[in-house]
Structures are given as C-alpha cells and as structure tokens.
C-alpha cells in the first residue's frame, strides 16, 4: 500500500482524536470511520482503513497497523504516544504539527507570489516596448545612433523576447535548488556564524527550532526521557538539523545542563534560559509547548515582514522600469528632434 496522502491523514487523525476523546475504543473508531466514509472518501483511503483494521485483529498495536501507511516520523510519534497511554493527545499533536508546517509553507510561498508576478510583468513590459514600440523609430534613426539608455532598454527587451526570460527562469530554478541543498546539508561554524543570520537560512533555522520544540513537548508529555527524545527527533531528518541534535546529545553525555547542552545555535538565548529554569519542574513539557507556540507566532511575523519587504522591492523595481522606459522614449524623441 502507498502512504496515505496528507489530506486523508489529517482527516483520519482528526476523527480518531474526536472518537477516542468520546471513549470509543480504537478498533470501533476505525470501523465507524470506514463505514461512514464509504461513498464520501477516496476508495484507496477506505482500503487503507480496512488494512489498518485487519492488522489490528492480529496485533492490537496501532503503531504496527500504521507502519508503511504513514511517514516513519509519524509512526515513531504514534508509537511513543501509544506506549505512554496518551494516544489521543499524541495524535492531536502530530496533526497540529502537520497543519502548522503546511501553514508556514503556504505563507512562505505566498510571500514570493507578488514579487514573482511583478518580475514577470516587468519583463513583459520591457519586451513589449522593445518589440512593438521602438522598432518604429529604426527607419528614422539607426539604433547605433540612439541614446545609450534607449539602446540598453531596446537590447534587453529583444533579448527577453528571443529567450532570455527562459534563461532567467532556469537560473532562478537552479539558484533555489542550490539554496535548498545548502539549507539541508551545510553545517559547521560558517553555517552557524554567518549563513544562519541571512535569509532564507534564518527562516529554515526558525522553522526547525519551532518543530523541535513542538516535537520535544509531545515526547516529554509522553514521559520520554529528553535524550531518547533527541534520538526520535533525529530520525530521518536533514544533515544540518542532525548535526545540531548530535551536538546536543554529546553535550548531555558530558553532563552539561540544559542551557549549555542545547546551546548549538539552533535555539535562541531566551529559549535556552527558559528551558534551564523549568527543566526540573513537572510541567516542563508544557513550557516546551509554550515556547513552540511563541516561536511559531514569531515565525509568522517574520514571514509577514519578509513578504512586505519583498512586495516593496518588487514595486520599486517595476516603478524604476517604467521610469527607465519613459526616460528611454524621451531621450530618443529628443535625439530625433535634434537630428532633423
């Protein structure tokens, strides 16, 4: 069977949480979802529910029943929740983490839509003037005698029309691919001391810190020791995040306190201080959850700020292009007048 799609995993998790909170046994909850979902949900999803039920007939473990049907990381989290007896809250936490991650991704993509549209509009306007407007002046005055500002605009527009825009898109795609690769794999002092202070690496760091706090909160709430929690979070993660987690584990093995052990440049100083103060208290998992919520709110604010900055930059770029076009036209008209 294929992995259940994110859409249906969220549906499944939501219904399971509601039914389990109403004290309906797990198998009965799955049976109810299957029976009521026929004709509403996708056939493959219903088959997946049936497979989960069949697996649970021979093994009551939900973890084993879901293995291969959901991502390994979610399997690990459900296993922890199941072993702790807090399966409902564990599934709810997994669902929330997925929704939060999707929301952040959606806002990040949305923040780039306006600049992208503005860039395309700018290229179309420049190409349009070069192809439709400026050629009418060629019969009156050779291009070689046009003002420099007009020649530059004319040549750029024709280059865009003849395929430069494709090269621009390819360059942007390659650049983004390189950035994604670097954000997942580059580690060390150069990453910690320099790259992580710049976009998009600082956003990657903030997202990772938020997810780390949310996951550790759930694991601690399920009575998983902190060191074991780090191993679970480290499962199938990026090379960059794994390097932080490995350093945390090494620091804890040396007997350092939380503030020192977790100081790998992933978490900010305020987070580290809060964790150090509350680490020995029974409600430490609640404190971690609060930190995760605060980090998530701050991340949304940063993305909103970035979106505003990018929008302003794109508007300025478009405005400068329009000024360039009118300047080129007026310069050309003035040149023509003086040549007559």
Image (cartoon, grey):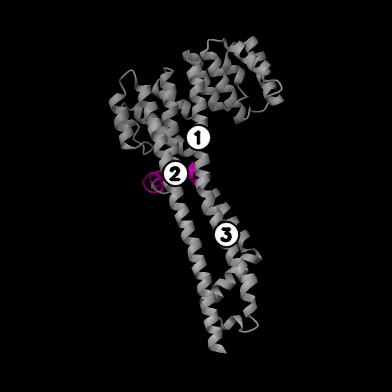
Q: Position of residue 75 (x, y in %)?
A: 55, 23
Does residue 332 appear to the left or right of 293 in the view shown?
Answer: right
Distance in Å between CA atoms under marks 3 and 1: 31 Å
Viewport quadrant of the N terminus = top right
Q: Position of residue 277 (x, y in %)?
A: 28, 26
Residue 257 shows in the view: no
Indicate the position of residue 266 as horizontal and vertical percent values: 39, 37
The part of the chain drawn in magenta is 181-196
In the image: residue 301, left or right of residue 127: left
Q: Secondary structure at mark 2?
A: helix
Q: Nearer the viewer, mark 2 or mark 1?
A: 2
Residue at the spot x=37%, y=30% of the render?
291
Q: Mark 2 and mark 1: span between their CA atoms?
A: 13 Å
Label 3 neighbour load within 10 Å: few <14, some 14-19, many 20+: few
Question: At x 53% / y 12%, what residue is drawn?
Answer: 22
Identify the residue under disc 1: 101
Of label 2 and label 1, which has the lower sequence position?
Answer: 1
Please determine whether, in this image, residue 305 is positioned above or below residue 238. Answer: below
Instruction: Using the rendered view, name the quadrant where residue 49 is placed.
Output: top right
User: Which one is earlier in the sequence, the residue at label 3 or at label 1?
Assistant: 1
Image: 107 above or below 311: above
Q: Is residue 190 magenta?
A: yes
State which quarter of the image contains the C terminus.
Answer: bottom right
> Sequence-wise, which precedes: disc 3 or disc 2?
3
Under circle 1, the secondary element is helix
For disc 2, the marked residue is: 303
Find residue 297 and report its image quarter: top left
Q: Is residue 276 left or right of residue 88?
A: left
Between tags 3 and 2, which lies in front?
Answer: 3
Disc 1: CA contacts within 10 A as few (<14), some (14-19) or many (>=20): some
């Amino acid at each position: 069977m294929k992995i259940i799609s994110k859409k249906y995993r969220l549906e499944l998790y939501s219904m399971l949480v509601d039914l389990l909170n109403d004290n309906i046994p797990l198998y009965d909850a799955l049976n109810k979802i299957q029976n009521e979902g026929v004709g509403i949900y996708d056939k493959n999803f219903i088959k997946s529910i049936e497979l989960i039920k069949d697996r649970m007939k021979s093994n009551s473990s939900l973890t084993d029943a879901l293995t291969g049907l959901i991502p390994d990381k979610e399997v690990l989290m459900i296993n922890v929740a199941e072993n702790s007896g807090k399966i409902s809250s564990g599934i709810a936490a997994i669902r929330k983490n997925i929704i939060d991650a999707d929301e952040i991704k959606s806002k990040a993509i949305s923040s780039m839509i306006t600049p992208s549209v503005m860039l395309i509009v700018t290229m179309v306007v420049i190409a349009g003037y070069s192809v439709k407007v400026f050629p009418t002046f060629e019969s009156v005055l050779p291009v070689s005698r046009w003002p420099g500002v007009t020649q530059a605009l004319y040549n750029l527009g024709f280059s865009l029309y003849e395929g430069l825009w494709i090269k621009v898109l390819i360059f942007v795609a390659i650049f983004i691919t390189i950035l994604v690769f670097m954000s997942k794999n580059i580690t060390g002092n150069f990453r910690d001391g320099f790259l992580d202070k710049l976009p998009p690496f600082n956003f990657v760091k903030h997202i990772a810190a938020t997810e780390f706090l949310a996951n550790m909160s759930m694991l601690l709430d399920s009575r998983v020791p902190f060191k074991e929690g780090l191993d679970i979070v480290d499962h199938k993660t990026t090379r960059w995040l794994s390097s932080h987690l490995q350093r945390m584990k090494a620091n804890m093995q040396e007997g350092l306190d939380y503030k020192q052990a977790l100081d790998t440049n992933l978490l900010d100083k305020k987070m580290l201080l809060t964790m150090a103060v509350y680490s020995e208290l029974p409600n430490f998992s609640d404190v971690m959850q609060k930190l995760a919520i605060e980090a998530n709110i701050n991340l949304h604010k940063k993305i909103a700020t970035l979106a505003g900055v990018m929008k302003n930059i794109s508007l300025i770029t478009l405005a400068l292009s329009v000024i360039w076009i009118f300047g080129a036209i007026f310069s050309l008209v003035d040149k023509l007048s003086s040549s007559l």
